[in-house]
Amino acid sequence: MGKFINPFTDFGFHRIFGQEVHKELLIDFLNQLLKDERHIIDITFLNPIQQPETIEDRGVIFDIHCRDDKGGWFVVEMQNGAQPYFYDRGIYYLSRAISNQGEKGKDWKFSLCPVYGIFLLNYKMGINSKFRTDVILADRDTGRMFSDKIRQVYLELPWFTKEPDDCETDFERWLYLLKHMDTLERMPFKARKAVFDKLLEVADVANLSKDERILYDEALKRYRDYKNTIDYAEEKGVEKGIKIGKTEEQRLIAANLKKRGVNTEMIAQCTGLSIEEIDNL
């Protein structure tokens, strides 16, 4: 196990970007991502579990769901491998974030705040041979933006190959750290900016509590098993894109953690399951 947590595990991603106590990390990452476009002072984390609007609908579980101080909504997702309809799912997630802004009554004028979908991909999409893909609503002929209310940013980390000395911006430094964090012996860039010093503190495995260490061990095992499965499939020429039922996976995780004595509240926080669901396992 490395000195720093793997940010591409469910636990690692949530610890770095999904906690109120460490929200300056997510704020800085988003500000660097959207530099000269949007400056965020504060964020409020929202419930990642979106219940279905009707009994026939299906619910949504976001990795990170938050709003900034200017009213913008953000859905931040981490994805380790290609899945069927992943891009359709991204559109669906953002559509839910838009529909959730609706207000009851005839006086609502359909005033919407912008919704951003940020997708960190630990694989190549196979659509463009580049690191960053920005998707906007634009006029087909002129390319001019039609509306700024929905925006998708896909970051394909395998295309980012810069070494520490080659990183020219704080955003590039963030990307280097995320991509290599679990193999680093020391945290570079920490002297350049206070937020990187904070990242060192948050990501250090030695700073995890006993319960957090159990959760991380489980998450790391799942991540390695998944990557080994993908590597084996590619080696044998098996079709990529193994679809995993996220809700069922979280139930299996919760059941395993429950057997190991992790308290129910922590299991709920890390899996997105309700207390009732965990009690019924």
Image: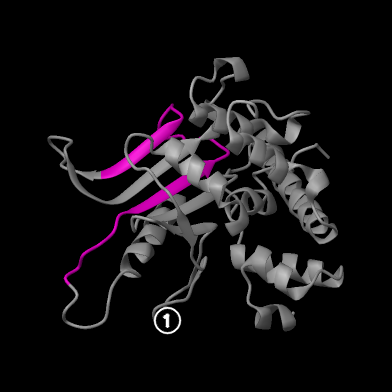
From the viewer's perspective, tell me whether residue 5 is left or right of residue 110: right
Indicate yes or no whether the magenta region holds residue 116. Answer: yes
Q: Can residue 54 be seen in this snapshot?
A: yes
Near mark 1 (Cα within 10 A), the count class, few <14, some 14-19 or many ≥20, is few
Say which element carries label 1. loop
Q: Can residue 125 be seen in this snapshot?
A: no
Indicate yes or no whether the magenta region holds residue 273. Answer: no
From the viewer's perspective, tell me whether residue 89 is left or right of residue 242: left
Q: Relative to residue 251, is residue 211 depicted above or below?
A: above
What residue do we see at 16% from left, 79% from top? Answer: 107
What residue do we see at 77% from left, 53% from top? Answer: 216
Q: Nearer the viewer, residue 92 or 262?
A: 262
> What residue sits right under mark 1 in the picture?
56
Region rendered in magenta: 109-136
Q: Position of residue 262 (x, y in %)?
A: 81, 69
Q: Which image quarter is the N terminus in?
A: top right
Q: Nearer the viewer, residue 178 or 128?
A: 178
Q: Relative to residue 35, is residue 48 depicted above or below?
A: below
- Three-letter code for the amino acid on which mark 1 is drawn: Glu
Q: Position of residue 75 (x, y in %)?
A: 45, 55
From the viewer's perspective, tell me whether residue 56 is left or right of residue 124: left
Location of residue 188 by image quarter: top right
Q: Position of residue 192 (x, y in %)?
A: 59, 26
